[in-house]
């Protein structure tokens, strides 16, 4: 039944971990990871669990926002249904002043995701999305969404050379170009990478250009380069940890983390590329 998905031990245990991170000066973004969704009922359960998490964030006064995936909320089933689910989530989040990030999935879902976001932006300002620097169209979309809060990532899916850069060099160069453009622009930016070369260059860029540290944050996956996360927070940068939860995902994640660090690559696959 639906109870299984809502406010179970999973939310309790992820809450304890968020509190620990908050005590270290690190903010969190939680991602409700469910199964692949084929039926409306499953999307409704996912939506309910996200709302339960929002209630928890508010009750416990956690420094935490929420990341969602639109395919989990019914994007492949019916776009209007997906928008309705998002509106319910955004209504609750807006009441608590919590930001909702729409994660970017594979290229098939790119335009539908942007379309849903633009619809939502007519009524909400507590929503944003992710730009993947491997996409050839990334700069155009970044310009279009100049006033919207965005996360910059490299991109986690295998995409065709028609739509995506394939070489690390091009992807990294585009990442830096987009991140710098955002940092010089008006809206808040999340720089989500574990790449210390990119982080180092952007630290230099913000220092040289006098960009205030409240205009951006670094984001990394929970358990990944933990020392660098603490160090960045101690140096006075905003640091946010990305944490999966939901449907026993948290337990699964923690077990994999405990087993061996190499599993982090598998975790990445699970979080961002569940179909492979
Ligand atoms: N990849 C995506 O394709 N879509 C996302 O929404 C997305 N969100 C991410 C959020 C965080 C906090 C991090 C750390 C990564 C995210 N990624 C996402 C994965 C990156 O695209 C990339 O595969 C991963 O970070 C490995 O590259 P790195 O060496 O730059 O860290």
Image (cartoon, rainbow, N blue to C red):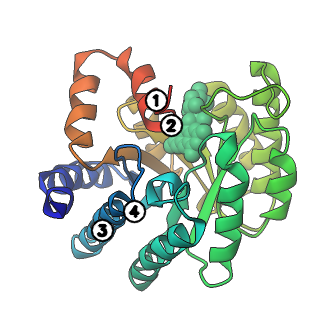
Q: Is residue 144 left or right of residue 276?
A: right
Whether the residue carrying mark 3 lies under 8 Å from ligand 1 is answered with no
Label 3 close to label 1 by CB (< 8 Å): no
Q: Mark 2 packing: few (<14 Cα in 10 Å), some, or many (20+)?
A: some
- x%, y% of residue 96? 38, 80
Return the residue at label 2: 272
Return the residue at label 4: 40
Q: Give the structural element (helix, strand or loop) at label 1.
A: helix
Name the residue located 27 percent from the left edge and 24 percent from the top edge.
Answer: 256
Label 2 close to label 1 by CB (< 8 Å): yes
Q: Is residue 128 left or right of residue 185?
A: left
Name the residue located 45 percent from the left edge and 21 percent from the top edge.
Answer: 265
Q: Which disc, if any, is residue 117? A: none
Q: Give the structural element (helix, strand or loop) at label 3.
A: helix
Mark 3 vs mark 2, foreground winner is 3
Q: Is residue 208 shown to the viewer in this render? A: no
- Pick whichever, 126 or 105, lies toward us: 105
In three-dimensional space, the C-alpha distance between marks 2 and 4, rounded to whole angstroms, equals: 22 Å
Q: Which disc, if any, is residue 48? A: 3
Please say if 91 is above or below 180. Answer: below
Name the residue located 63 percent from the left edge and 40 percent from the top edge.
Answer: 106
């Amino acid at each position: 039944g639906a109870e299984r998905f809502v406010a179970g031990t999973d939310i309790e245990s992820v809450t304890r971990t968020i509190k620990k991170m908050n005590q270290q000066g690190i903010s969190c973004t939680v991602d409700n990871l469910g199964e692949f969704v084929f039926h409306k009922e499953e999307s409704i359960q996912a939506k309910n669990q996200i709302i339960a998490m929002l209630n928890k964030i508010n009750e416990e006064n956690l420094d935490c926002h929420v990341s969602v995936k639109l395919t989990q909320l019914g994007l492949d089933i019916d776009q209007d249904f997906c928008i309705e689910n998002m509106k319910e989530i955004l209504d609750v989040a807006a009441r608590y002043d919590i930001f909702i990030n729409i994660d970017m999935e594979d290229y098939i879902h790119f335009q539908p995701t942007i379309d849903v976001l633009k619809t939502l932006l007519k009524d909400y300002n507590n929503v944003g999305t992710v730009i993947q620097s491997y996409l050839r169209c990334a700069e155009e979309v970044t310009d279009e969404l100049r006033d919207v809060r965005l996360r910059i990532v490299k991109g986690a899916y295998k995409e065709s050379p028609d739509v995506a850069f394939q070489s690390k060099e091009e992807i990294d160069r585009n990442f830096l170009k987009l991140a710098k453009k955002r940092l010089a622009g008006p809206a808040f930016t999340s720089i989500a990478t574990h790449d210390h070369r990119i982080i180092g260059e952007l630290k230099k860029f913000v220092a040289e250009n006098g960009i205030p540290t409240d205009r951006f944050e670094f984001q990394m996956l929970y358990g990944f380069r933990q020392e660098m996360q603490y160090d960045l927070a101690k140096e006075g940068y905003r640091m946010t940890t990305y944490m999966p939860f939901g449907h026993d995902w948290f337990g699964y994640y923690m077990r994999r983390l405990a087993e061996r660090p190499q599993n982090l690559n598998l975790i990445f696959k699970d979080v961002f590329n569940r179909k492979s």
